[in-house]
């Protein structure tokens, strides 16, 4: 609760900063036609996203002008405190993309006085769900063709990685895994057999006993919400899964990196 109060107070202070950012959303220089004029001229929409995760979805959907608010160094996006420069970016945006667990997006838009469309994004790297979300965003952005091309690339990439991981199964059998609730997509990528899940809260003693009894070969931990070693006495190898793309906003790289971690772990069993 204390962290929430502090964050709310800081967002409230950002609202006051709008007096120092006169008419950011409505007034521009004579040389700046603004995002609406750019779209009318056939340009791509201006998109502001809270994190690189939303940014990768936007880029995959065909957005060419994407600004990320939360630095990649901030592993837990809801803890981020927006800055005045964030308001300036939002004020010029056509779309602001956020996730439901990020409480500040609407406040940022309000503070900047932006007319941007606020879009909630379903951040799930499950390939089917990711493709559906990219397709939806492509419809919003007017970039359906780009979104369709990405889906084709995603399907091919996932099929290749799945084949590689299946060939790396220890003993030629699908490995049993325990997944954090936001890393289940990686188990699917590997063709693994999920025998249990945990999180986002830390594992309780009762859960520890229950999951350990499943005798999983691997634990797929969420790098951004890690609670340390999940099953310390179960003999399971813990694999670090990263959900957020890098600064290049390459969503396909997330799948490649996860596959590399899984291959390495399976090769060590």
Image (cartoon, rainbow, N blue to C red):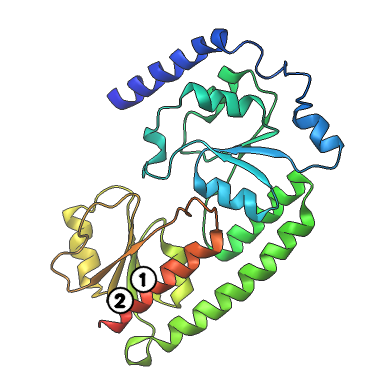
Q: Which mark is residue 61?
A: none
Most extreme residue toward the top, as rendered? 19
Residue 172 appears at what percent x and percent y? Answer: 37, 92
Q: Residue furthest left?
A: 233
Which residue occupies 43% across, 63% down?
A: 184
Give the vertical position of 231 relative to 67 (above or below).
Answer: below
147 or 189, which lies in front?
147
* Image marks 2 and 1: residues in contact by CB distance under 8 Å: yes
In the picture, the quarter occupied by the N terminus is top left
Q: Position of residue 17 (x, y in %)?
A: 51, 12
How far apart are labels 2 and 1 at the CA level?
6 Å
- The structure residue drawn at horizontal position 80% and vertical position 35%, both measured from the top left corner, is 38
Could you tell me which secondary element the residue under label 2 belongs to? helix
Q: Residues within 10 Å of mark 2 (few under 14, many from 20)?
A: some
Residue 96, compared with residue 214, is above or below; it is: above
Look at 35% across and 25% down and name the residue there: 4
Q: Residue at x 74, y 58 (%)?
A: 146
Would residue 235 be found to the left or right of residue 222 on screen?
A: left
Would residue 267 be visible to someone looking at this image? yes
- Other residues around mark 1 within 10 Å, as few (<14) / some (14–19) / many (≥20): some
Q: Is residue 55 above or below residue 210?
A: above
> Does residue 1 appear anywhere in the picture?
no
Compared across the picture, whether 70 is left or right of 218 comes to right
Q: Which mark is residue 265?
A: 2
Q: Position of residue 93 (x, y in %)?
A: 67, 31
Among the 4 quarters of the image, the one containing residue 43: top right
């Amino acid at each position: 609760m204390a962290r929430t109060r502090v964050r709310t107070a800081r967002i409230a202070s950002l609202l006051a900063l709008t007096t120092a950012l006169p008419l950011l959303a409505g007034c521009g220089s004579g040389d700046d036609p603004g995002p609406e004029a750019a779209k009318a001229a056939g340009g791509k929409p201006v998109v502001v996203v809270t994190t690189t995760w939303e940014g990768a979805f936007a880029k995959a959907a065909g957005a060419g002008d994407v600004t990320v608010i939360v630095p990649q160094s901030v592993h837990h996006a809801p803890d981020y405190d927006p800055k005045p420069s964030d308001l300036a970016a939002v004020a010029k945006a056509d779309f602001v993309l956020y996730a439901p667990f990020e409480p500040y997006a609407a406040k940022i838009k309000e503070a900047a006085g932006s007319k941007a469309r606020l879009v909630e994004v379903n951040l799930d790297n499950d390939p089917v769900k990711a493709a559906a979300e990219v397709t939806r965003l492509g419809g919003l952005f007017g970039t359906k063709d780009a979104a369709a091309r990405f889906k084709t690339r995603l399907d091919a990439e996932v099929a290749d990685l799945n084949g590689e991981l299946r060939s790396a199964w220890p003993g030629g059998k699908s490995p049993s895994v325990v997944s954090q609730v936001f890393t289940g997509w990686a188990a699917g990528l590997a063709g693994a057999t999920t025998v249990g899940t945990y999180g986002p809260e830390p594992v309780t003693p009762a859960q520890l006993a229950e999951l350990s009894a499943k005798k999983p070969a691997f634990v797929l931990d969420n790098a951004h919400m890690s609670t340390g070693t999940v099953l310390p006495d179960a003999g399971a190898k813990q694999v670090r899964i990263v959900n957020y793309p890098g600064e290049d906003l390459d969503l396909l790289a997330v799948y490649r990196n996860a596959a590399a971690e899984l291959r390495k772990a399976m090769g060590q069993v």
